[in-house]
Image (cartoon, helix red, strand yellow):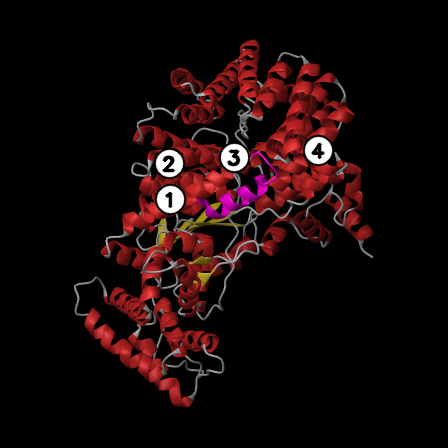
């Protein structure tokens, strides 16, 4: 197994798009008054919405405020960018993903509310205006169930939720210098951006008056100022002011909205006119990407006879130099993006050219081609590379699907959806997968030849969300259609799905019959598919629930070997998990723990949240049987935070019965109070620490710098040693008193102490 461990270690750099605050790529200028105001408001109001026109700086203010306020919230800050979300019904799912709330079926809004119920967290919802109704409903629901939650939203219009406090973000101050002689914010912003754009440029007495007039003419709107500053690469300050002045006069003659909107529109219009014909063309075409994109995608999607693919890199470079396109590197890869305001402008231009439909379909065709390549390699060693690709491109795929759902070429659409279904499964995002699969089944005529496999996969998603009745109906249809079409692949998918449904219903013998028939047909056809590798995993589960542990281990081992032969990791690690569970039930605890910890390492490196949850629970079961109850229960608490209390995915509802068995034994051994304390402690463990707890021997805790305590708990313990009361500690750390109370309870439980004096002695003894 050394090769397996080595293979896993190569993928430890896999990144997940989480709710971390985005990095600020340019300096932050001014806005101290607004920052202080917003910081104060999020301490006294549970929903604060920053409103204002596009380009006024709402997102930058929200990010900077959240950065400063992060330490105030015990559970930190989560940032959710909604600019690429085109489906309001996927809002709750998008927030779940940002917070790392794993898929378990049911309503994602309910799962989100359960996850946030006891957390003290600042949630930043950025760019709400295009899904404002969905944002309002979700925000109201979450605030009603999570008393420790604060929401900071940015939107061009209010959410209109009870208790919402609006902050209208005005443009930067302009014209006059401060009483201390310092330049106004808008002039400082122009100066910093101009100096970055033109080497050696500085604000001087000679050019200051022109810059002041220019910033005043631009109404102090940050985006407009930045677009103007970059034009100094080609023009003098006077030329910029003169050309902009003419354009503003023309634009303000139109029947547009407010002067501020007119000013921004004028600045963008002018930037557009300063672009070459190729740059204007590419600007419009790039608007089909809802999120960041790479050069390869731009070349394939946006090129044609008017813009040859070999010229795209030069044109992209020109747009970057003009600050229309920004670099947005991710994971060491060069990527690009446009600000929402500029992307919207490009989309208007594309529509005006009557090319929107054409280029959205070209965008879909590009992703469909990539998905074809993905499907062929997803069950091999390239699996992780494709999962990384999907994480980067998911927002673009999601957006383009909404536009071509009913109009894309049928065969390409069907094949793309089939691959996406597998990626949603591997990614653990069944909720989104079912959303799109249900919409596809509604929008398309799926009674024609070739659709049976996709219908069966749609049924699998329903099964794994415990909607067995709906899944059964779809599987019967898929099986009949595959038989009529003579489609062996569709038949294998239908039989596999029927076997999984039987497993979920408790008909283990029936499950094994369906799965065996699917496996036999699969061997006859020689087809390869990552979902087909699951046949042995579910067969192992059926044997496990029949108490045939030897057969369960045999099928699980076959799944592991199949994955190893192909270099595949996802199914292989599920095989390890089921094999480890079977060995646990058979009483071979050492062998069980070895398999389970190896499986958890793979799931961790794949960032498979469903697999991690099952791994933590399975290791907890094994530890409980070894008598390590406190550690086991802490792991149960950590896993419980990642899923609904009584549901599981992949392993079916009967897995919950196994969980209840070792929960009962732990309660009997520890007593209800100690059990609840350990469980609560586990619920508050950050995921990396929970995984460390599962993988490490507890005896190693003493050798760690903090002993068994987290960094925050060690900080609290040190304040206890200083003689501070719980209220004083709460004030010192800017946390709620009940949070300080909870920290001290956990410290006492972890150290086995009964008094604050013992904590003080422990801290003193650890000091050099």
Whichever of callouts 4 and 2 sits on the residue coming sooner in the sequence is 2
**Tags 1 and 2 in contact by the CB under 8 Å rule?**
yes
Q: Earlier in the sequence, mark 2 or mark 3?
A: 2
Can residue 143 be seen at all in this image of the molecule?
Answer: no
User: Picture quarter containing residue 457?
Assistant: top left
The picture places residue 205, in percent across and down from the top left corner, at 41, 89
Left or right, 447 with respect to 720, comes to left
Q: CA distance from mark 2 to mark 3?
A: 22 Å
- Residue 274 shown left or right of residue 458 in the figure: left
Indicate the secondary structure of the residue bearing disc 1. helix
Residue designated by label 1: 364
Q: Quadrant of residue 410?
A: top left
| SS category of the residue bearing label 3 | loop
Marks 1 and 2, how far apart in space? 9 Å
According to the picture, the residue beneath numbered tag 4 turns out to be 597
> Residue under circle 2?
413
Q: Main secondary structure of the magenta part?
A: helix
Residue for point 24% across, 56% down: 353
The residue tagged with tag 2: helix, strand or loop? helix
- The local crowd at label 3, few if under 14, some if 14 to 19, many if 20 or more residues have their Cα within 10 Å, is many
Image quarter (top left, top right, bottom left or bottom right) of the C terminus: bottom right
Give the residue at x 52% y 14%: 514
Q: Is residue 512 magenta?
A: no
Query: Mark 2, mark 3: which one is toward the viewer?
Result: 2
Q: Quadrant of the N terminus?
A: top right
Instruction: Tell which tag, 3 or 1, sits nearer the viewer.
Output: 1
Earlier along the polypeptide chain: callout 4 or callout 1? 1
Choose between 751 and 435: the one closer to the eye: 435
C-beta proximity under 8 Å, tags 4 and 1:
no
Question: What is the C-alpha distance between the residues marked 4 and 1?
Answer: 40 Å
Residue at (30, 53) in percent of width and height: 157
Residue 682 image position (x, y, % from top left): 64, 36
């Amino acid at each position: 197994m050394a090769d397996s461990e080595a293979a896993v270690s190569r993928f430890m750099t896999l990144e997940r798009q989480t709710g971390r605050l985005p990095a600020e790529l340019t300096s932050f200028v001014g806005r101290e008054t607004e920052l202080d105001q917003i910081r104060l408001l999020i301490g006294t109001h549970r929903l604060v919405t920053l409103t204002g026109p596009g380009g006024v700086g709402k997102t930058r203010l929200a990010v900077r405020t959240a950065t400063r306020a992060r330490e105030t919230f015990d559970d930190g800050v989560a940032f959710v960018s909604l600019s690429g979300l085109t489906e309001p019904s996927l809002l709750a799912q998008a927030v779940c993903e940002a917070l790392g709330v794993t898929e378990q079926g049911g309503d994602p809004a309910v799962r989100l509310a359960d996850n946030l119920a006891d957390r003290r967290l600042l949630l930043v919802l950025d760019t709400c205006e295009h899904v404002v109704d969905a944002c309002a409903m979700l925000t109201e629901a979450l605030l009603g169930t999570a008393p420790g939650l604060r929401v900071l939203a940015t939107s061009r219009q209010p959410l209109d939720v009870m208790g919402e406090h609006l902050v209208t973000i005005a443009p930067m101050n302009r014209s006059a210098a401060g009483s201390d002689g310092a330049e106004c914010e808008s002039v400082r912003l122009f100066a910093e951006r101009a100096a970055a754009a033109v080497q050696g440029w500085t604000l001087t007495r000679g050019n200051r008056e022109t810059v002041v007039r220019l910033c005043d003419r631009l109404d102090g709107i940050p985006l407009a100022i930045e677009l103007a500053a970059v034009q100094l690469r080609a023009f003098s300050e006077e030329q910029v002011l003169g050309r902009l002045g003419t354009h503003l006069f023309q634009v303000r003659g139109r029947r547009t909205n407010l002067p501020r909107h007119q000013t921004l529109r004028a600045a963008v219009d002018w930037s557009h006119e300063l672009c070459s014909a190729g740059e204007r063309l590419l600007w419009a075409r790039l608007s089909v990407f809802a999120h960041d994109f790479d050069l390869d995608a731009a070349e394939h999607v946006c090129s044609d006879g008017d813009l040859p693919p070999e010229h795209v890199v030069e044109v992209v470079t020109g747009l970057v130099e003009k600050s229309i396109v920004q670099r947005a590197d991710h994971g060491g890869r060069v990527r690009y993006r446009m600000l929402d305001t500029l992307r919207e402008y490009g989309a208007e231009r594309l529509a005006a050219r009557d090319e929107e439909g054409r280029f959205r379909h070209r965008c879909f065709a590009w992703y469909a081609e990539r998905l074809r390549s993905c499907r062929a390699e997803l069950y091999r060693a390239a699996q992780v590379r494709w999962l990384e690709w999907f994480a980067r491109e998911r927002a673009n795929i999601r957006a383009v699907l909404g536009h071509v759902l009913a109009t894309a070429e049928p065969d390409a659409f069907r094949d793309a959806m089939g691959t996406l279904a597998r990626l949603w499964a591997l990614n653990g995002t069944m909720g989104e997968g079912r959303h799109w699969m249900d919409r596809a089944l509604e929008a398309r005529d799926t009674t024609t030849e070739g659709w049976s496999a996709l219908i069966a996969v749609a049924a699998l998603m329903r099964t794994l969300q415990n909607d067995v009745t709906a899944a059964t109906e779809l599987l019967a249809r898929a099986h009949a259609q595959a038989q009529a079409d003579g489609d062996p692949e569709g038949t294998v998918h239908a039989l596999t799905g029927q076997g999984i449904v039987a497993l979920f219903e408790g008909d283990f013998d029936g499950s094994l019959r369906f799965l065996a028939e699917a496996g036999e047909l699969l061997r006859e056809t020689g087809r390869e598919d990552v979902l087909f590798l699951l046949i042995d995993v579910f067969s192992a589960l059926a044997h496990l629930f029949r108490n045939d542990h030897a057969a369960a281990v045999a099928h699980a081992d076959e799944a592991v070997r199949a994955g190893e032969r192909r270099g595949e990791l996802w199914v292989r690690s599920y095989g390890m998990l089921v094999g480890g569970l079977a060995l646990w039930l058979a009483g071979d605890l050492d062998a069980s723990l070895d398999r389970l910890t190896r499986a958890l390492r793979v799931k961790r490196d794949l960032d498979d949240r469903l697999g991690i949850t099952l791994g933590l629970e399975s290791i907890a079961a094994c530890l409980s049987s070894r008598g390590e109850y406190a550690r086991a229960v802490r792991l149960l608490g950590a896993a419980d935070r990642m899923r609904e209390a009584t549901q599981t995915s992949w392993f079916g509802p009967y897995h919950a019965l196994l969980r209840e068995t070792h929960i009962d034994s732990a309660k009997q051994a520890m007593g209800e109070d100690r059990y609840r304390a350990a469980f609560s402690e586990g619920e508050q463990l950050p995921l990396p620490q929970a995984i460390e707890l599962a993988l490490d021997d507890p005896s190693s805790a003493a050798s760690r710098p903090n002993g068994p305590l987290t960094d925050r708990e060690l900080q609290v313990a040190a304040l206890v040693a200083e003689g501070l009361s719980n209220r004083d500690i709460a004030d010192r750390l800017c946390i709620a008193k009940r949070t300080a109370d909870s920290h001290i309870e956990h410290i006492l439980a972890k150290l086995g102490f009964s008094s604050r004096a013992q904590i003080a002695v422990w801290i003193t003894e650890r000091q050099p």
